[in-house]
Amino acid sequence: MDDNTLAGRSTRRSLLKMAGAGAASLSVPSFLAACGSANDTTSTTAAVTTAGPLSVSSGGTIPTKTVKFGMAPFADATFYVIAMRQGWFKDVGIDIAPAPTGLQVTPDNVVTKLVTGEADIATFYGPGKIATMGKAPQLKMFGFSDTYVGTYILVSPSAKQQTVSELVAGGMPFEAAVKQALAPMKGKPVAFSNTGQHRDFLDQAFKLGGLTFSDVKVTATTDAKILQLAKGGQTDYTSPEGAAQNIELLNDGWVPLVSVDDLLKGLPPGDPRSVAAVGHEGPACSDEYFAANRETCLRFISVMFRTIDAIASDPARYLADQIPYQESVSGTKSSVQDLKSIYTNNDPLIPFDEQTQYWTKLDAPTSYKTIYDAQIASAQKGGVLPNGKTFTADQAIIGKEVYDQLVALRKGYDGLAAKASGLSGAEKTMAAAAKKQYDARNYLDAYRMLKTATAKV
């Protein structure tokens, strides 16, 4: 299987290959005022160069802001439509433009739309941001919604074969487990996607398994043909590119023989053999937009977290809102169960409190620095980014700054909550509104409102 055999169209996954309002300000707790400042030893380089220390605007009302928002045609990039249909953006003063569901963007045009201002905020893919940071350094991802780990070699249930994760769980060392799990593939037919999306992962999995592509009978073909071969019993090993095809096989009982998640858990943090196939979806904007509209960005990402919570709590209710839009932009049929499977197996959505794995535990295998500093090194080695110039994850991703600020705002609200018990009249009403925003993950306005409501206490 040569490079040309697996070369194909440019999609989000192929990017792996390139591996506001108010003049007055409220006084804020010291831990909040310092968030993102140059004196904060935990702040990132990006935190110093984006918008400076957070100064929260005063007042008990939420200003209205129109946001030109673009979504890519992938399930983990279009779940925001749930919030649009539920009115949750309007709850934080955001009007999505163009109405009713914003712009459609693709991996090929998202940079242009953000640079030209056609979009204020758009969904972006982490490896894509890394690949373009040399030419569009002003664009920053300011959060992650999920981790893409939906890359596998799947094995048929009829093979009755132990997987890498099962062998490791049984006490076998990781590299020995990969070799044992992949050994039965030798001489057998395997069907891989012909788009080239999984080439890095397949290369590393085969090397770890002690195999070469000449050791197996490869069919590189379309995902539709892969399904035909798999369902017809003509292969026990597959690696489709598309989430829908992976989900269909998983629903039929196929299991990951080896996965990106296995490599992340089994190899050292930041090992290029694992991180090259990992990516994150999330909102992005320009430095200029973030600096001028930081409160809007904080409100926007609060809606993202509210939506993730809603999907987890009642998927049947809320995913039904996403299906019509997702089908219209992707050209494929979908169901609540399909989307649940995607968010379980391919693109697990990460709620607010679990996002410490990205932004707090910076030496963890899952942290943004571990993954993207390694991808930057690979991109420079491969000529995607120029050598002789320093690039860091903090220059592309400012999610730590945003997450730290939201955590600080929540702490600020929690510190004021006891004062709300004795309020009456308009102040009591405002405190109730603050609690509603707090419960919806809008920690910015929860803090602003409660600070104003308790100002005389």
Image (spheres, grey):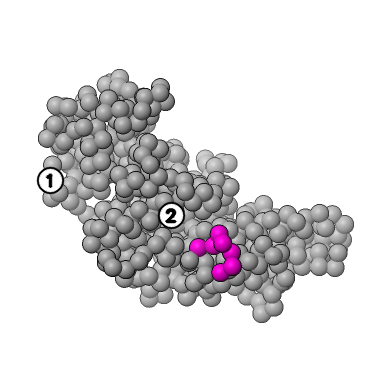
Q: Residue at position x 31%, y 37% from top?
A: 152
Q: Is residue 457 left or right of residue 50?
A: right
Three-letter code, disc 2: Lys
Residue 402 percent location from the top left of the image: 55, 61
SS for callout 1: loop
Q: Distance between the residues labelled 2 and 1?
A: 32 Å
Which image quarter: residue 182? top left
Vertical order, 233 against 67 (above or below): above
Q: Name the residue that disc number 2 marks.
A: 369
> Magenta region: which residues?
38-44
Which residue in the rendered view is the most extreme toward the bottom?
Answer: 23
Q: Is residue 313 left or right of residue 424?
A: left
Q: Name the residue that disc number 1 marks.
A: 2
Sequence-earlier tag: 2 or 1: 1
Near mark 2 (Cα within 10 A), the count class, few <14, some 14-19 or many ≥20, is many
The verdict on residue 236 being magenta is no
Mark whose residue sits in front, 2 or 1: 2
Q: Is residue 247 left or right of residue 17?
A: right
Q: In this view, does 201 lie to the left or right of 217?
A: right
Three-letter code, disc 1: Asp
- Main SS class of the magenta portion in the image: loop
Task: Specify whether residue 83 is in view.
Answer: no
SS for callout 2: helix
Residue 252 percent location from the top left of the image: 34, 28
Q: Residue at position x 81%, y 54% from top?
A: 418
Q: In which quarter of the image is the N terminus?
A: top left
Q: Which of 176 and 306 is in front in this view?
A: 176
Q: Which of 374 and 104 is in front in this view?
A: 374
